Amino acid sequence: MRVKTIGKGRKCLFAIMLIAAALTGCGSQGIQTHTHNFVKEYWPSVPTCSSGGFYNLYCPDCGEEGGSGSDPALPHSPVTREEVRGNCSSPTILVKECGICGAELGRESRFENEHDWKTRISDPVWSDETGDFTVRKITYCSRCDICR
Ligand SMILES: [Zn+2]
Ligand SMILES: [Zn+2]
Ligand SMILES: [Zn+2]
């Protein structure tokens, strides 16, 4: 039963192949007008995102040449990379570049945080002026330690 089924399947496939051969015009060339099926053959290279590509057209069925042309470069594939990690005193720099060819497509900078101002009292320091230990009020940023 199983063998019979396979045999039937093969016959069927063979029939399809015959039909396909008839449709592609095998043996009927010269009678019917052959419709060229031009495909592009890029030379020296296919278009990439950094350069376009020149091509020649040819028909793979009969080898007929169909002229030449060029295609523009493909679009870049932008990815964003953090070049510098900033804080509240220096900005983070983000670079947008192509993940394939590495071309820089733009950059932006942004501050991660505002300064976080706080005040504290300094350790006592001797002052000749007053002849005593004095303390100072210090304003500082808790995030980046900028004093002012
Ligand atoms: Zn052709
Ligand atoms: Zn690119
Ligand atoms: Zn700060």
Image (tube, rainbow, N blue to C red):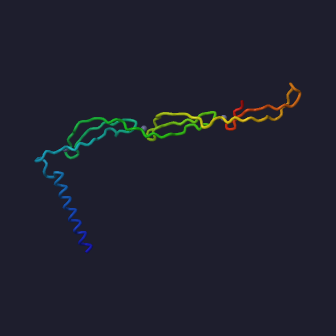
Residue shown at 42% from the left, 38% from the top: 76
The percent position of residue 64, horizontal first and vertical second, equals: 20, 41
Residue shown at 66% from the left, 35% from the top: 115
Q: Nearer the viewer, residue 140 or 61?
A: 140
Q: In terms of image quadrants, where is residue 139?
A: top right
Residue shown at 75% from the left, 32% from the top: 138
Q: Horizontally, is 133 left or right of 92 in the view?
A: right
Question: On screen, 14 above or below 60?
Answer: below
Q: Horizontally, is 105 left or right of 144 in the view?
A: left
Q: In terms of image quadrants, where is residue 67?
A: top left
In this view, which residue lies farthest toward the right? 131
Quadrant occupied by the N terminus: bottom left
Q: Nearer the viewer, residue 79 or 63?
A: 79
Residue shown at 67% from the left, 36% from the top: 116
Q: Nearer the viewer, residue 115 or 92?
A: 115
The percent position of residue 136, horizontal first and vertical second, equals: 80, 31
Quadrant occupied by the C terminus: top right
Ligand 1 quadrant assignment:
top left
